[in-house]
Amino acid sequence: MPGSTNTLLIEGSFEELSDELAHYVDEIRRRQGDDTASIQADITPILEQGQKDEALKKLVTGSAVLNAAPEKEFIAAYNLLVHLVRQSPNLDKFLPKICQNLSAPITSSPSNGAELALSVLTTIFNILPTDNETRYHVLMAILRVVRGSSSFDALKSQLKNIDLWIEQWEIDEEDQRKLYLSIAEIAQEASEDEQAYAYLLRALRTISVEEASSDEARMLSIRALKAALLHPSHFDFQDLTALDSIQALRKSDALHFELLEIFNAELLDDYNDFADEHDGWIEEQILDTLVLYRKMRLLTLASLAASSQSRSLPYQQISRALQIPSEDVEMWVIDVVRAGLVEGKLSQLNQTFLIHRSTYRVFGEKQWTEVQGRLDTWRSSLEGVLSVVRQEREKVIREKERELKELESRMNGGGNVTGMGAAGARRTPRDIDIGAD
């Protein structure tokens, strides 16, 4: 797979190496029973005239037969072709054909063909300057091979470089979209749902406002919408609703948009009303109703927790909202905690779910009102605490003042005692002095 830039070293002059490769291509053709004109014979006079690009054109055109080269010779033959092509000022003219050949099946090695093709394509990618846009076309060829061989793991480690490459190549939004969609499709076929959705979303973000209502945008938007709804751990839909192409569904595909809005902000009752009103539509869209029901219950429980002023939910309220038996409440609470939507603990004794942390699914006017109510409650509680603190402080001050007054009263009323004590104090050192004599 693509890595740091490499250098390809092959000894020999351009003419000598071209003649050698042409002879090799003719040999493979003869093995396949192709007795058409010899490429070696065709390029000899061309090379004598110094027309290197014309010779390369014939070599590259005939290079498709290299896919039938013996496995042990395959990489060397293609590397020689790449070395010759690199010496042309019109590199971009020849590489696409080579990449196309390498994207086709390697007939000489059905089992290791993908590995061989990826090795050559990686070499091509790495010998090109990092800012060369041709790297984009080579990468697209790599993706075609990866997809055909179901080897997504070989691509995974390189995904971190995608953003940097796009910046270096300065490719337009359309090419970016093609790249993202290719990665999304490979990931989806490899059951990498998280990656597939992430790159599908990135593809949608390349669609401009002017293109938001196009057929391509509509199809991609519906595809992303379904992927988000069916993804077992995707619960935040604002990444979708913020896109222009998704908003365009409000007119072109109103039911899809309405369903998304329900999952974005509404509750299980709203979903059931939608399903009843549009009976059979969800199944027609090939959406798994069991998956949708489960996700909608988890989202409903998350909304209940976020809107609870008391920070606790009785089992009975959860059972009612989720339309489940009371004995299943704890299981659903555990599931919503595992999903990361809520944090808290169950009180079996009090049949209550105590909420430690919850997050609003959307934040609008209703949520601001709830926050204001909660802040008012906290303010009232703090005012009560401050009032108690002030009362206790005043009580302590009064107590200290009372003690001081009592002390002063005792001191003023017991002067003789103090005098006797003083006299005694003078006698004590005298007695000590006598004893010392």
Image (spheres, rainbow, N blue to C red):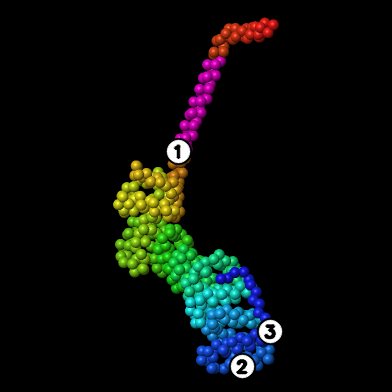
Whether residue 337 is situated above or below residue 53 in the rendered picture = above
- Callout 2 amino acid: Ala
Q: Secondary structure at mark 1?
A: helix
Q: Secondary structure at mark 2?
A: helix
User: Closer to the observer: label 2 or label 1?
Assistant: 2
The spot of residue 363 in percent (x, y) is 45, 53
Residue at 32% in and 52% down: 328
Q: CA distance from mark 3 to mark 1?
A: 88 Å
Q: CA distance from mark 3 to mark 2?
A: 18 Å
- Callout 1 amino acid: Ser
Q: Quadrant of the N terminus?
A: bottom right
The spot of residue 340 in percent (x, y) is 44, 53
Magenta-tinted stretch: 382-408
Residue at 49% in and 34% down: 386
Depth check, front residue: 148 or 360: 148
* Residue that lies at the very extreme toward the front in this rendered image: 72
* Residue that lies at the very extreme toward the right in this rendered image: 437
The spot of residue 170 in percent (x, y) is 60, 71
Check if residue 278 falls in the magenta segment. Answer: no
CB atoms at circles 2 and 1 under 8 Å apart?
A: no
- Characterize the magenta stretch by its predominant secondary structure: helix
> Within 10 angstroms of label 1, few (less than 14), some, or many (20 or more) residues?
few
Q: Which mark is drawn over residue 41?
A: 2
- From the image, tell me which residue sits under label 1: 381
- From the image, tell me which residue sits under label 3: 13
Whether residue 339 is situated above or below residue 257 in the rendered picture = above
Q: Quadrant of the C terminus?
A: top right
Depth check, front residue: 196 or 5: 5
> Within 10 angstroms of label 2, few (less than 14), some, or many (20 or more) residues?
few
- Callout 3 amino acid: Ser
Whether residue 54 is situated above or below residue 179 in the rendered picture = below
